Image: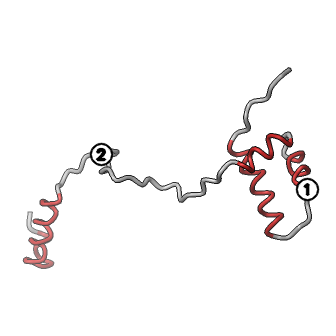
Amino acid sequence: MNRQSHYSTPKKARIRGTIDYLESRRIPHFKSDVFRFHGASQRSGWRALAEPEDTGDRSFHSTCSETRGRKRKLSKQDLAQIERFLEHNGFDGRTVP
């Protein structure tokens, strides 16, 4: 027996999205028809619907400090010193080398 592997996330998302759309518009439908349209068996279609939806904002949330990316050339102290210099000397301070 040739067993099919699990469906990819885009296929599951299409199944969920189609059913969500039909239900939000109150269009009468059978879920088995949606599964057949997307080429999924009923068992796999119901499994895709039963999985918890992770619809977070997909942002990186962590309590750790950021370690990715390029190192800063100026520290926060350097930036504060530059800001104080500009506030003290005004617009003409911008042209001082």
In the rendered structure, which disc, 1 or 2, sits on the residue that comes first in sequence? 1
Element at label 2: loop
Q: Amino acid at mark 2?
A: Arg
Q: Is residue 61 left or right of residue 46?
A: left
Q: Quadrant of the N terminus?
A: top right
Q: 4 or 75, which lies in front?
A: 4
Q: Which residue is mark 2?
A: 70
Callout 1 crowding tier (Cα within 10 Å): few <14, some 14–19, many ≥20: few
User: Label 2: few (<14), some or many (≥20) within 10 Å?
Assistant: few
The amino acid on which the numbered mark 1 sits, given as a three-letter code, is Phe
Distance Cα–Cα, label 1 vs label 2: 52 Å
Residue at image point 30% right, 51% down = 65
Image x and y of residue 10, in percent: 70, 46
| Colour convention | secondary structure
Q: Where is 27 relative to 43, above or below?
A: below
In the displayed structure, 92 sits above or below 18; it is: below
Figure quadrant of residue 70: top left
Secondary-structure class at tag 1: loop
Q: Quadrant of the C terminus?
A: bottom left
Residue at 87% in and 53% down: 31
Identify residue for label 1: 30
Q: Position of residue 32 (x, y in %)?
A: 90, 49
Whether label 1 touches label 2, CB < 8 Å: no
Q: Position of residue 27 (x, y in %)?
A: 89, 67
Q: In the image, what residue occupies the spot 80% across and 57% down?
A: 18
Asked if residue 6 lies left or right of residue 59, the reply is right
